[in-house]
Amino acid sequence: MGFGGSAAAMITSLKNNKRTRVSTFQKMKDFKEGKNIQVSFDKKATPQQLKRIREKLQSENKKKLIRILLISGSILIIVIYLIGFVKF
């Protein structure tokens, strides 16, 4: 056995590197509701503020959508042009 020393070193290394691992079932058993982070806000938003926030988010989302459509459309046109008209 020419690899006896290396195999023995491997086995010794594996034995020394063992650690206790907590199983998923143990983690679920120890999970408690009190450990969860509860988010609470002291300040309340008025209906006008909520409406303004909603409108702002909607306008930002429309701008993002238009930008994405323009970029993807231009890329699509360039790809179609390259495939159809450029001779290799």
Image: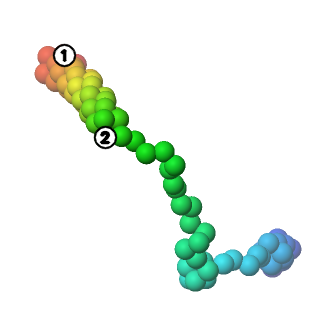
- Residue at the location (79% across, 72% down)? 17
Quarter of the image for residue 60 reads: top left
Which residue is nearer to you in this view: 22 or 33? 33
Which residue is nearer to you in this view: 12 or 78? 78
Label 2: state its secondary structure: helix
Please state if 60 lies on the left or on the right of 28 as rendered. left
- Residue at the location (52% across, 49% down)? 42
Three-letter code for the amino acid on which mark 1 is drawn: Val
Which residue is nearer to you in this view: 81 or 77? 77
The residue positioned farthest toward the top in the image shown: 86
- Answer above or below: position of 50 versus 12: above
- Label 1 or label 2, whichever comes before in sequence order: 2
Quarter of the image for residue 80 reads: top left
Q: Quadrant of the N terminus?
A: bottom right
Three-letter code for the amino acid on which mark 2 is drawn: Pro
- Determine the CA span between mark 1 and mark 2: 57 Å
Q: Are marks 1 and 2 in contact (CB under 8 Å)?
A: no
Q: Which mark is residue 71?
A: none
For mark 1, does the 10 Å Cα neighbourhood hold few (<14), some (14 to 19), or many (20 or more) residues? few
Quarter of the image for residue 34 reads: bottom right
Please state if 48 lies on the left or on the right of 8 as rendered. left
- Residue designated by label 1: 86
- Residue designated by label 2: 47
Which residue is nearer to you in this view: 49 or 73? 49
- Answer above or below: position of 16 versus 49: below
Residue 79, position as x, y percentages in the image: 21, 24
Residue 16, position as x, y percentages in the image: 83, 75
- Residue at the location (53% across, 60% down)? 38
- Residue at the location (31% across, 32% down)? 52
Label 1: state its secondary structure: loop
Q: Is residue 5 visible?
A: yes
